[in-house]
Image (tube, helix red, strand yellow):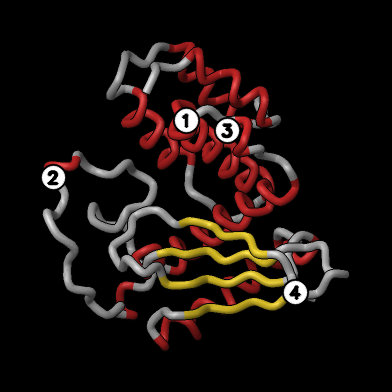
Amino acid sequence: MMELNCKGLEGDLCGHLHPFLESAAKSLDLAADFFSFSIVADDLPDALEPWLHLRPSADPAEARPGGILFCAETCFSRFTPATSTVLPRGEIWDQAPAPRRHVPFDMKYFSEVRTKAFLHHELLLARDLVRGGIVPSALANGQIEAFSAIWAVTVDGRLSRMGLPGYSMAQRRSQFSRLFSGVGVLLPDHWQIFQSLWDGGLVDWKDVLAVIRHLPRL
């Protein structure tokens, strides 16, 4: 049994999200790894990246952690240049010089497709962390950005093979290209690495970490 919650989001959005969260959690058997999982509004309403917090249970007999995913409401709206969480953020000089006033979420912009992709991607990533599929402490500071980007390819590749919603290969190729082509020339060998990540040829986190040295250095 697992408790699922949506907190701090616009009232209508919380109610609307809950069945999508239930469906994603069930399809990924999240109850085997978490005693609870919550989607919570980020304190920074314009935050572009979600982040996960794991908390232990108050019950000493409960070995599973609770998961809290902090994210912006824009993660559930239609893709626009300002709300995309797949494409890299713009250069610092192109970003707003100060936080903008929070605009309440308008349900007419709610995207079922994006919501399903976002939830499945983030929940599978959370499951990887709990099951030891990723060991963050093994990453050097200079490897975190590259590893995060290429591990995301493996996450959506797995979702695709499982027949579950996720970000498309085209979206992941776009992110991969924009990130690494900004610091070097992408060669056929680099695209072979991308395809292996997507197709499941590289699954273990150690193997994924090892290919970073073959990609342009961020």
N-terminal-most mark, 1 or 3: 1
Label 4, label 3: how many angstroms apart (C-alpha)?
38 Å
**The quadrant where residue 83 appears:** bottom left
Closer to us: 144 or 207: 144
> Do the residues bearing badges 2 and 3 touch, measured as CB atoms within 8 Å?
no
Circle nearer the viewer, 4 or 2:
4
Locate residue 136, reporting x and y percent.
Answer: 60, 38
Mark found first going from the N terminus, 4 or 2: 4
**Residue matched to label 4:** 58
The 10 Å Cα crowd at callout 2, few under 14, some 14 to 19, many 20 or more, is few
Q: What residue does disc 1 label?
A: 141
Vertical position of residue 93 compared to residue 206: above or below: below
Crowdedness near tag 1: few (<14), some (14–19) or many (≥20) residues, C-alpha within 10 Å: few
Q: What residue would you read off at disc 3?
A: 198
Q: Which residue is identified by label 2?
A: 94
Q: Please give left or right for residue 63 compared with residue 199 in the image.
A: right
